[in-house]
């Protein structure tokens, strides 16, 4: 370039020009033709680029028809087969997942503050369940109520002043139910969903006791105003001491036959304590009667302590019946929608979930979850439990049998891969299953990978990292394709319902013997209410509450428990 510039300045220009340039100088017509062709080429290329950009713009603005989309998908599959490293690129060509879960979630959150809220949809298969328009509308109405009455709002501060006085004589603009953090993590998730549904049914604001780790585990589910109870809440220092002997316990108040209605102008208590834990008595259970709900509606503050998923018994309260039918036309989706709406892992927990999923589960053709909870005393692993797990998985064709005769089985083509996610306090079951599928090929030629994120040996309810791992593993189980769970385990209930999975339930072993059959398919994905009332509020007598309506039945794993199922004759 420098040389060319120097020659332009010099006297010997022609001696340094290339041959084509010399010819063009000698023949002006040839130069003109060359330039015209060049200009025309540039013009045509410009038209092509413009048409491509215009087409892309139209396609992005107006999605293609199904036929066009199917062709596009076929091309994406061709790219995927061509080069594995282009998986990430091909994913970007797919239609994005519905991050708002068909309207279940509210838009407008700061996505970076809780990545899981909208990102989780891309980790799950699209389910056939659709939230009812009534449920969506009700959730938006609740969010507006929570914004108006949540912590430190004008209405909240007003009710706090009356709470401090100990009594109230007039109705307030906002009423509340306070959930006390109590019991293990699985129980807490189930009971918090129960408390929220009760709050929605009674037009109350739910406030959550943060306990020792709730803030670390769960994102805020409602826009703009926190669901966590302020640290300066006047009754907070009484939470640990609230029990059935407390003077504000509803069951004890009924035993004393106290006349605490205000129909005659008398004052009412500013709060009532609801003891709904597994050890509650007959008076406490009157909470599930319509006439008692009529009274409780007058109390501005309800303080609730429970370790039960009591949603099935809410469906048996006549005053709630129609509302619940509108909210959940398909009954077995109750916790599934409540859980997907309320429980979003914080960023630190979401990191644990996604890193594990991407490392061990994502590339498998099928993901199988096996959740093991052993209630036997003594040190495991127990051989009869392992035998039961294996018998269930093989009998239900979840896992293939092993070939003990040949050292290798070579199927034609690429073998199918299955990733088995096991969760247990013990590592022994994982090690046995891993070694079995490592030491022997499968009769089908399938490749089986066995994984277990943690083995904490014993439950450590108050330990932060323990609960992070527990929440991580529940969530990972919910991302599997099929699931095996243990009887009586709320850990398994959370996983199956969040994932919309109808699990195979391992029967509870008796006398340290593997039961035969080893497991059965659940009636629905709903959790079980372990300690329901057996009482007819109208007749004031005992009754089998598992036989009153077709959609509330006894649980498979606990004969006296209740769970929601769908009566398909009604659908």
Image (cartoon, rainbow, N blue to C red):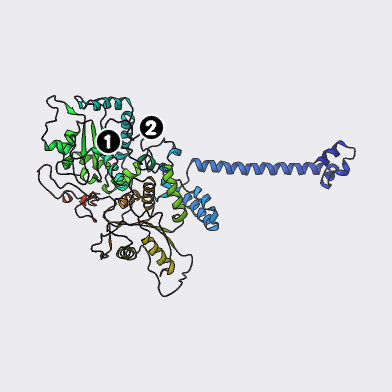
Using the image as rendered, state which of residue 135 and residue 49 is in the foreground. 135
Split into 4 quadrants, where in the image is the N terminus?
A: top right
Residue 273 in sight here:
yes
Quadrant hosting residue 329 = top left
Q: Is residue 273 left or right of residue 83?
A: left
Report the disc number at residue 248. Answer: none
Q: Earlier in the sequence, mark 2 or mark 1?
A: 1
Using the image as rendered, state which of residue 116 and residue 387 is in the foreground. 387
Residue drawn at x 75%, y 42% is 35
How many numbered circles are shown?
A: 2
Residue beneath disc 1: 178
Using the image as rendered, state which of residue 455 and residue 17 is in the foreground. 455
Q: Which residue is outermost to the bottom?
A: 405
Instruction: Single out the mark in the foreground, 2 or 1.
Output: 1
Q: Is residue 416 left or right of residue 296?
A: right
Using the image as rendered, state which of residue 40 and residue 332 is in the foreground. 332
Residue 97 in sight here:
no
Q: Position of residue 23 (x, y in %)?
A: 84, 45
In 3D space, how far apart are the residues under numbered discs 2 and 1 (Cα atoms)? 19 Å
Q: Which residue is outermost to the right?
A: 11
Q: Position of residue 265 (x, y in %)?
A: 13, 24
Quadrant hosting residue 324 = top left
Q: Position of residue 512 (x, y in %)?
A: 26, 64
Q: Secondary structure at mark 2?
A: loop
Image position of 513 with respect to 100: above or below: below
Q: Position of residue 332 (x, y in %)?
A: 27, 49
Q: Secondary structure at mark 1?
A: strand
Residue drawn at x 23%, y 34% is 302
How busy is the neighbourhood of tag 1: few (under 14 within 10 Å), some, or many (20 plus)?
A: many
How busy is the neighbourhood of tag 2: few (under 14 within 10 Å), some, or many (20 plus)?
A: some
Tag 2 near tag 1, CB within 8 Å: no
Residue beneath disc 2: 224
């Amino acid at each position: 370039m420098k040389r060319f510039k120097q020659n332009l300045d010099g006297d010997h220009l022609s001696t340094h020009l290339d041959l084509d340039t010399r010819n063009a100088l000698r023949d002006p017509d040839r130069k003109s033709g060359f330039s015209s062709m060049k200009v025309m080429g540039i013009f045509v290329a410009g038209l092509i680029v413009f048409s491509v950009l215009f087409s892309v713009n139209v396609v992005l603005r107006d999605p293609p028809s199904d036929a066009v989309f199917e062709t596009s998908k076929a091309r994406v599959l061709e790219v995927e087969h061509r080069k594995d490293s282009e998986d990430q690129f091909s994913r970007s060509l797919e239609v994005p997942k519905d991050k708002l879960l068909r309207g279940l979630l509210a838009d407008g959150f700061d996505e970076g503050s809780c990545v899981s809220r909208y990102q989780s949809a891309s980790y799950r298969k699209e389910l056939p369940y659709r939230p009812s328009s009534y449920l969506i509308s009700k959730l938006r109405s609740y969010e507006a109520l929570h914004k108006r009455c949540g912590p430190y709002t004008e209405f909240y501060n007003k009710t706090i002043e009356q709470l401090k006085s100990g009594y109230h004589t007039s109705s307030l603009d906002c009423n509340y139910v306070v959930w006390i953090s109590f019991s293990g993590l699985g129980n807490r998730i189930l009971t918090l969903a129960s408390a929220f549904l009760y709050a929605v049914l009674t037009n109350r604001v739910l406030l959550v006791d943060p306990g020792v780790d709730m803030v670390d585990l769960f994102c805020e589910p409602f826009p703009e105003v926190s669901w966590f109870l302020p640290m300066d809440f006047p009754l907070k220092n009484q939470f640990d001491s609230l029990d059935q002997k407390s003077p504000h316990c509803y069951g004890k108040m009924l035993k004393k036959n106290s006349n605490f209605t205000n129909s005659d102008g008398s004052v009412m208590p500013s709060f009532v304590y609801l003891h709904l834990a597994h050890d509650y008595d007959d008076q406490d259970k009157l909470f599930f009667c319509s006439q008692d709900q009529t009274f409780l509606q007058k109390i501005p503050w309800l303080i609730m302590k429970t370790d039960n998923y009591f949603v099935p018994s809410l469906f048996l309260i006549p005053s709630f019946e129609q509302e619940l039918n509108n909210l959940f036309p398909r009954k077995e989706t109750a916790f599934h929608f409540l859980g997907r709406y309320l429980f979003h892992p914080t960023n630190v927990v979401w990191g644990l979930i996604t890193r594990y999923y991407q490392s061990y589960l994502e590339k498998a053709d099928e993901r199988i979850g096996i959740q093991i909870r052993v209630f036997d005393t003594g040190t495991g692993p127990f051989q009869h439990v392992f035998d039961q797990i294996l018998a269930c998985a093989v009998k239900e064709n979840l896992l293939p049998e092993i070939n003990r005769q040949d050292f290798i089985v070579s199927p034609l083509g690429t073998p199918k891969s299955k990733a088995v996610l096991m969760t247990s306090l013990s590592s022994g079951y994982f090690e046995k299953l891993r070694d079995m599928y490592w030491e022997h090929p499968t009769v089908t030629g399938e490749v089986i990978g066995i994984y277990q994120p943690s083995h904490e040996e014993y439950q450590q309810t108050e330990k932060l990292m323990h609960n992070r791992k527990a929440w991580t593993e529940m969530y990972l189980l919910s991302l599997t394709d099929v699931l095996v769970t243990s009887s009586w385990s709320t850990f398994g209930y959370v996983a199956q319902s969040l994932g919309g999975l109808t699990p195979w339930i391992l029967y509870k072993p008796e006398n340290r013997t593997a039961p035969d059959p080893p497991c059965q398919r659940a009636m629905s994905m709903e959790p079980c209410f372990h300690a329901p009332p057996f009482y007819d509020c109208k007749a004031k007598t005992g009754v089998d509450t598992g036989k009153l309506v077709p959609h509330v039945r006894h649980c498979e794993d606990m004969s006296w428990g209740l769970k929601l199922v769908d009566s398909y004759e009604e659908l």
